Image (spheres, rainbow, N blue to C red):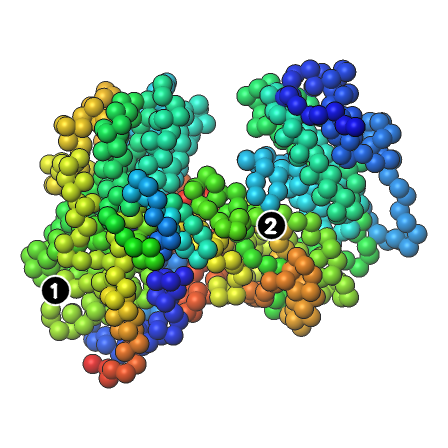
Amino acid sequence: MKHHAEYRDPEAAKRVLKRIHQSVDPSREYRFMEFCGGHTHAISRFGLHGLLPSNVRLIHGPGCPVCVLPIGRLDMAIALAMKPGVILCCYGDTLRVPGSEGNSLQKARAYGADVRMVYSASEVLTIAEQSPSADVVFFAIGFETTTPPTAHLLLETQRRGLNQVSVLCNHVLTPAAIRAILEDSEQGPRLDGLVGPAHVSVVIGSSPYTPLASDFQMPIVIAGFEPLDILQAILMLIHQVNEDRHAVENEYTRAVVPEGNQRALMAMREVFETRESFEWRGLGSIADSGLRIRSSFASWDAESRYDLAYQAVADHKACECAAILRGQKEPLDCKVFGTACTPETPLGACMVSSEGACAAHFTYGRNLRNFR
Amino acid sequence: MCLAVPCKVTELLPDQRARVELDGLKKDISLAFVGPVDVGSYVILHVGYAIGVLDPEEAEKTLALFEELDAQPPP
Amino acid sequence: MRRPIAGAITLAHGAGGRASHQLIQEIFLFHLGNPFLQQGDDGAVLDPLEPGSQGGRWVTATDAHVVTPLEFPGGDIGRLAVNGTINDLAMMGASPRYLTAAFILEEGLSLALLDRVVASMAAAAKAAGVPVVAGDTKVVERGKGDGIFITTSGFGLLPPGIQCGGCRAKPGDAVLVSGTLGDHAMALMAERNGLIFDPPLLSDTAALHGLVADILTPRPAAVHVLRDPTRGGVATVLNEIAQQSKVAIEIDESCLPMRPEVTAAAELLGLDPLYLANEGKVIVICEATDADSILLRMREHPLGQQSSRIGEVLATSRPYVEMKTRWGGRRLVDWLMGELLPRIC
């Protein structure tokens, strides 16, 4: 696969790993957080943990939009799905996530709700055209990578006058979340660097990270999605730490430019505005971290159209996700990890999707001694 | 988050869409966020949309970096 | 001259009267007809065991099939049903001899579609040399079925000296697979997810008893486990065997045979190929010393041309399945959690 296989070359990986092993200062620890759930998944799937020096710790961040979706917001989607005449469209990732009382979109479907999994937001338009009398609701989740498709859906819906379509918007913003994590990390244990998300950065560019690097004296390296990209980014972070630098560096130059994707950003600005605050499961409320649909698109905003009250739902008492998402604790530190809380029966955010720190550890590494 | 894959544009389609190809697999996607692209260029595909265009020169530079590691002396 | 097949299944077809009789004559007996079925009795009297099968034992297996869509690139529910049960018998090391088939048909099902499915079953049964000797049909009201449900049962003859089973894997054994993974699952997912395979990707549905016979001769004792990685994929089958045999199984990612376009499709949808269903592949666990010769024989068979040695069995106190990634990293290969769903994240 072009632009794919080359970034998985085992020989090149050996070289980067050798350089990583040569570059680390044996007298100290390096704690790097990879923000993006996709990176967490790639690291686990490719077994990168066991290959790094033992003093390089990878901390899994909260960049998994399914994991951080508050239970209360999922409950709203389930309630909508159960309304007669509604077709609820969602991405596959959200189908099995448990809401309150063990409900889920999949269970709603078993009870007769019309829940349809879509691969792309654009399929919502096709479904609406095929079922003109139904109320078609799109359960939108995701970071800035997934937001432009929802913006496009709303713009097209407006253009075609498809009044039966609406969107329940749960899009969240990466820089605000990173800021919240870095603020927490000042209380310790301290992070030494951040591996920045690949595809969020394709959309927002590398420039939004600059104030974060300087405000928190934090090295940030934006990494591509492939294992070699991740290893190279770790090497670049190690160099920054060794040289006491705190810059934003871009390893994913083939896809990320400082100004990002202007077309995507414009479409997003046209359709969405920033919420003053938005709740993140495990992290609590974060300022300026979520998007809501602008009043000019209110006709297609499921939150305006339907009488939906948001009710916060607390996580299980024993759940340590709040600390794990901030990198302060590890999955094995949680009393319910692997017992009451498993990917089949998730109690908290980190277990809910295959990219969450706990799910990744459980699925890929729970029997490996070096797995972190 | 954000499972996205680089794919080659093999055909431009009406309504800002294109057919892309990935190792023999083809898919029709939206180019709404990348504007006009050339057939043969690579785009980053996420949930049915191209969210960015791959810069082949930068790609070469990145790959060259991995090669160089052998040549460079360790720090 | 056969009457043109048109119209749809009605509740009358399930009532047992004239319409039922006509349906059986015109579609089922037309395609599947053989001396056993032609008797028209409630059961089939099977041929006596052949001379020389002393010590041989009957093996039986049953399978229910509920696939959607009913027709897909490379096959249909009928073909899947026949091959599926033949394969269940083959995985025991038995030579498949007879099949039975029971159909639950939904009111409104197109008769032309039913005709195609039954014709396809007949062709699959004929190609495999395994007749359908008894059958049944029922009709349910519209909305109470998914078009067609098929349950097939099979009878096979297990020659003496063959003992394959999930509990027989031993530390030191080699793990082989007969060909490319994930083809069936992706062929079914293609249309639903807007994936275009050109040339079209076909399901790998196939009757494996011929390949299995080649694997077992000349030294059946060397073959410890045979299993086809259907629903849940290779990962599920290996976990089952590891648990049954109380062993560890380690596989090597770079040895897994896969079509590049299937790998690409799995990447695109965020699916792990280890969990994708196959309908025409077999996992073989055998003594390491015999692995090379078995592989050679497999590769000579049309259904095993891309056979590959993918791993080994190890001793352990707690059964697990692990995979060595392309650069020596290691990851657990766990049981499938829930169902396999495409991801965006």
Residue that extends furthest to the right in the rendered view of this protein = C51
- Is residue C285 visible in the rendered image? The answer is no
Q: Amino acid at mark 2?
A: Asp
Residue A3 image point, x, y percent: 34, 62
In the image, C5: left or right of C332? right
Chain to which mark 1 belongs = A
In the rendered view, tell whether residue C267 sits above or below residue A78. below
Residue C119 image point, x, y percent: 71, 36
Front disc: 1 or 2: 2
The residue sitting at 15% across, 42% down in the picture is A266
Which quadrant of the figure contains the N terminus of chain A?
bottom left
- Label 1 belongs to which residue? A247
Q: What is the CA distance from the residue labelled 1 to the residue labelled 2? A: 52 Å
Question: Considering the numbered disc 2 on the image, is that residue within a helix, a strand or a loop?
Answer: loop
Question: Considering the numbered disc 1 on the image, is that residue within a helix, a strand or a loop?
Answer: loop
Towards the viewer: A59 or C180 = C180
- Label 2 belongs to which residue? C204
- Is residue C94 visible in the rendered image? The answer is yes
The residue sitting at 90% across, 49% down in the picture is C50
Towards the viewer: A336 or B49 = B49
Residue C297 image point, x, y percent: 70, 66
How packed is label 1: few (under 14 Cα within 10 Å), some, or many (20 or more)?
many
